[in-house]
Image (tube, rainbow, N blue to C red):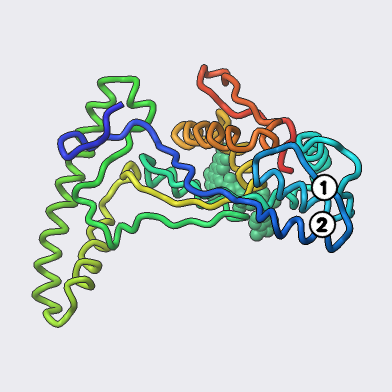
Amino acid sequence: MTSPSPDNPYVTHSKVYLLGKQSVVAEELQRFLDDEGLVFSTDTPVAGEVLAEIAGRTCYMSFGKGRKTNLEYLENIISSKHGSVLEHVVWNLLLTGISRSLTHELIRHRAGFGYSQLSQRYVDESTASYVVPPLYQENEELRRKWTETIECVRKAYAELAEMSGRHVKEKYPEMSPRDRRKLTRQAARSVLPNACETKIFVTGNSRSWRHFLELRGTPHADTEIRLLAVEIFKALKKESPNIFNDLTLVEGSDGMPCVSVVHSKV
Ligand SMILES: Cc1cc2nc3c(=O)[nH]c(=O)nc-3n(C[C@H](O)[C@H](O)[C@H](O)COP(=O)(O)OP(=O)(O)OC[C@H]3O[C@@H](n4cnc5c(N)ncnc54)[C@H](O)[C@@H]3O)c2cc1C
């Protein structure tokens, strides 16, 4: 897989960087158990899974009682749709190599998500990359036509940005260079296409990630976001096999991977 460059500003795959996860403060957990006269241990090394179990057990003060393994405990939480417990588990992902049209769909997921996205007002997009839609990756003629179109837009953006920069400088000589650049780029970006590559930092809790994977990891979803959902699924399932235990990767009827969910919308 080649990375985009000024000569080849085309991206064909998303990248998922799992940058942040939780940890358990063991001394504080012990202090709580001692204060309450409780004994508790669990068998998972995953902090998020431990925290979800502690959160759930707090509801009934069932420490040291009932289900023995973390997987058994979380399976019961998930199958009985006690999903609020899963909101205590959070991962921070940095996503790159994705299009603006994808992030437009992604940010529709409101509950339990936080977003920070590359700004087209602050960042000069004349060297931006462009995400090739999966359909155009499999057909040379379509890809050529698409690339020609994108090249026209890239040129138009660079020209417009330069012309508007001159205009803004003449019209607002007192304005700071930073504000001038912002005024210039916010106007010029209006011609950028949906395919423009972007980067977005997403924080989501495990209940929300499950819902996202269920809606976007299917053949009904746009192919680009579906393939991203598959990559996010792989990263999260590796992180937390117990919370995502009932989610699996299967082959869709179109031959592409998709995410299958046993317990829908927990
Ligand atoms: C295949 C597909 C096609 C789509 N096509 C379109 C389209 O053509 N046009 C379009 O506009 N969108 C479209 N969407 C987006 C879709 O309508 C949702 O906006 C998006 O999937 C986020 O889902 P959500 O609201 O369940 O998620 P979230 O916003 O994360 O919410 C999660 C859950 O929390 C609850 N919730 C959140 N906010 C509220 C609230 N304000 N009030 C009550 N309950 C709430 C709901 O139960 C919701 O399901 C499409 C989505 C998919 C997957």
Ligand 1 within 8 Å of the CB at mark 1: no
Q: Is residue 71 above or below residue 119?
A: above
Tell me the kind of residue under disc 1: Phe
Say what secondary structure mark 1 lies in. loop
Judge the density around disc 1: few (<14), some (14-19), many (≥20) Cα neighbours within 10 Å: few
Q: Earlier in the sequence, mark 2 or mark 1?
A: 2
Quadrant containing the N terminus in the rendered view: top left
Quadrant containing the C terminus in the rendered view: top right
Give 244 or 38, whichever is nearer the viewer: 38
Alpha carbons under labels 2 and 1: distance apart: 7 Å
Using residue 158 as the reference point, say whether residue 195 is left or right of it. Answer: right
From the top left corner, tell me how far across and down residue 135 is, in percent: 38, 26
Q: Which residue is mark 1?
A: 40
From the top left corner, tell me how far across and down residue 36 is, in percent: 87, 61
Q: Is residue 125 above or below residue 145?
A: below
Residue at position x 20%, y 45% from top?
A: 153
From the top left corner, tell me how far across and down residue 190 is, in percent: 28, 56
Residue at position x 35%, y 55% from top?
A: 118
Specify the label residue 26 is tagged with: none
Specify the label residue 33 is tagged with: 2
Q: Are marks 2 and 1 in contact (CB under 8 Å)?
A: yes
Tell me the kind of residue under disc 2: Leu
Give 46 or 105, whichever is nearer the viewer: 46
Residue at position x 23%, y 52% from top?
A: 125
